[in-house]
Image (cartoon, rainbow, N blue to C red):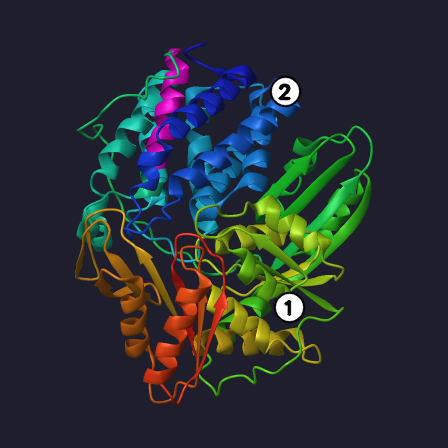
């Protein structure tokens, strides 16, 4: 490769090599899960996101660096899985924005593109946390720019980014106490280091099996700074549309929109371009796009209203919702993420229009969520992610579905089921969002699984093979028998106001065993309405809901 410029072919090689290096080390990144449970998936999610970028590059065969970056952004956007994958896709989105329309990129332009990627990724996260992939990306971009200003070539810029990211990665346990307690570095940050190592390989022309280099000291002249959280909505109107025409140029359409707002995404081909932008004047956005072709699927939403509505729902502490409300109707559709065929059938029986299989070990991609939302025969769609690691992908899908999409940030299966039961067809969307948020808050989630490695979490020492009783994301007790741990967990979670206890048993538990445990709990807790249902979920012996 030329040492002073990256063209389209070089950028494609960087993406391919980065994807290969990450895939080679995917399992080691998965193993860095803070919780020592068997569903660590950060490496898998990031690797699948990178593969989606590689596939899009292969399909579009870009020539310029701008087109190559656009293809990588589009592929990673639709293929993003998990929170780490979504953040990665936002990094590519910012890089594509910075390189748009360029035939090649100089070292300084590469560094600026990395910085734009970081700025875009930070906007995608409501409350950025230091010691995560965002920190690694930010510091890598700062180091890259310092190297470019010092006169380094393309190789020096990428090496500086890798060196800084590796150095910061080793210090993530000092930034996040939970990492230090678990004895690991940040998984997303480690994944990003492998991606940068792949970039360095590509620039050097090294064989794909060479995973890069080690760095122990920070580059000189680079200062580590903690970022400020930015929470204001400067451009309140979330504006989305399609532009249809002939010989369309996404870069040309984008160039007139950059000054009208932020969170800009312009992707597509010569006949169809999708536009997304946060703006203070949707009329000017429409007027600009109209000059290039006809407009379709126009959606304009006031994010301040949405934020205030969701904030109000999120902070509600009122009476629990009536769980007997009807399920989804024709005006509003519901998409739910599930794991296990039994739980999937329960969601469908309660009225979910589309159920996406996924969750713990294989998070659905942004494209999976988009496709499910589009299948729903309603212009308004509520998405229930039912996993904290899917919420960002669901929010990203909201921008791309071409419908009015609302995400209720459910983090567990019991929360999703409670939210679905709280939905009422005759209520307004705002009222339903409040009802569903209240329902989520009223339910307690218990999970029983096993530990895959030695760790200390929440002050609890864990050994491989220990059975873990998890209450709303925290380890409440450990033991040697899944059934005994479930019984102990239920005793801890049930309070004086508890009325209903529902247990979904997974594919590690047979029906006879579940029936015996159900009889035991009914005898021990005669005042509760207790029901066991087959969930069929992998890895988790039991998932329990207490209301």
Nearer to the camera, 72 or 241: 72
Q: Residues within 10 Å of mark 2 (few under 14, many from 20)?
A: some
For the point 51% across and 38% down, the residue is 94
Q: Is residue 535 visible?
A: yes
Q: Quadrant of the N terminus?
A: top left
Task: Say which residue appears at 55% left-offset and 33% top-offset.
Answer: 52
Does the stretch in magenta take in 28?
no
Classified by dominant secondary structure, the portion drawn in magenta counts as helix
Residue at 61% across / 57% down in the picture?
A: 355
Q: Earlier in the sequence, mark 1 or mark 2?
A: 2
Q: Residues within 10 Å of mark 1 (few under 14, many from 20)?
A: few
Which residue is farthest front? 512
Expressed as whole percent of the image width and height from the top left, the position of residue 425 reads 70, 77
- Residue 204 belongs to the span the image colors magenta: yes
Distance Cα–Cα, label 1 vs label 2: 45 Å
Q: Is residue 441 above or below residue 475?
A: below
**Residue 5 in picture, x, y percent from top left:** 47, 15
Q: Quadrant of residue 502?
A: bottom left
Query: Which stretch is magenta?
Result: 191-205
Evaluate if marks 1 and 2 touch, with contact meaning CB atoms under 8 Å apart: no
Which residue corresponds to mark 1? 349
Report whether 169 appears left or right of 296. left
Disc 2: which residue: 61
């Amino acid at each position: 490769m030329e040492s002073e410029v990256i063209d389209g072919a070089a950028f494609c090689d960087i993406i391919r090599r980065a994807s290969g290096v990450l895939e080679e080390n995917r399992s080691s990144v998965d193993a860095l899960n803070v919780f020592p449970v068997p569903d660590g998936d950060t490496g898998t999610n990031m690797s699948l996101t990178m593969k989606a970028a590689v596939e899009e590059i292969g399909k579009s065969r870009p020539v310029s660096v701008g087109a190559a970056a656009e293809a990588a952004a589009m592929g990673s956007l639709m293929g993003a899985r998990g929170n780490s994958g979504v953040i990665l896709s936002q990094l590519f989105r910012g890089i594509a924005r910075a390189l748009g329309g360029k035939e090649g990129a100089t070292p300084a332009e590469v560094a600026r593109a990395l910085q734009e990627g970081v700025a875009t990724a930070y906007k995608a996260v409501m409350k950025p946390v230091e010691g995560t992939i965002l920190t690694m990306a930010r510091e890598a971009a700062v180091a890259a720019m310092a190297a470019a200003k010092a006169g380094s070539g393309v190789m020096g810029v990428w090496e500086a980014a890798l060196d800084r990211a590796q150095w910061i990665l080793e210090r993530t346990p000092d930034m996040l106490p939970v990492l230090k307690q678990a004895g690991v570095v940040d998984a997303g940050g480690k994944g990003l280091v492998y991606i940068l190592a792949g970039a360095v390989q590509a620039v050097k022309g090294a064989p794909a099996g060479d995973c890069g280099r080690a760095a122990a000291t920070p580059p000189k002249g680079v200062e580590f700074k903690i970022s400020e959280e930015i929470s204001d909505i400067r451009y309140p109107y979330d504006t989305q549309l399609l532009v249809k025409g002939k010989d369309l140029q996404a870069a040309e359409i984008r160039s007139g929109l950059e000054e009208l707002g932020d969170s800009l995404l312009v992707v597509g081909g010569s006949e169809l371009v999708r536009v997304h932008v946060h703006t203070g004047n949707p009329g000017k956005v429409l007027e600009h796009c109209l000059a290039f072709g006809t407009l379709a699927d126009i959606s304009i939403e006031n994010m301040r209203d949405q934020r205030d509505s969701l904030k109000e729902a999120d902070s509600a502490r009122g009476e629990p919702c009536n769980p007997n409300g009807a399920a989804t109707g024709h005006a509003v559709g519901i998409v739910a993420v599930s794991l296990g065929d039994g739980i999937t059938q329960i969601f469908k029986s309660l009225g979910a229009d589309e159920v996406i299989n996924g969750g713990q070990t294989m998070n659905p991609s942004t494209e999976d969520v988009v496709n499910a939302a589009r299948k729903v025969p309603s212009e308004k769609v509520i998405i229930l992610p039912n996993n904290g690691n899917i919420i960002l992908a669901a929010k990203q899908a909201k921008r791309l579905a071409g419908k009015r999409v609302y995400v209720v940030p459910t983090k567990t299966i019991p929360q999703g089921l409670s939210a679905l039961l709280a939905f009422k067809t005759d209520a307004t969307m705002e009222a339903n969002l409040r009802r569903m948020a209240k329902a989520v808050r009223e339910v307690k989630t218990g999970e029983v699984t096993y530990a895959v490695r030695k760790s200390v979490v929440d002050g609890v020492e864990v050994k491989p093979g220990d059975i873990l009783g998890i209450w709303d994301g925290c380890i409440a007790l450990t033991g040697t028998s899944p059934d005994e741990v479930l019984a102990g967990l239920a005793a801890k979670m049930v309070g004086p106001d508890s009325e209903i206890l529902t247990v979904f048993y997974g594919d590690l538990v047979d029906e006879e065993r579940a029936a015996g445990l159900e009889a035991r709990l009914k005898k021990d807790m005669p005042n509760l309405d207790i029901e066991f249902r087959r969930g069929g979920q992998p890895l988790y012996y039991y998932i329990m809901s207490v209301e």
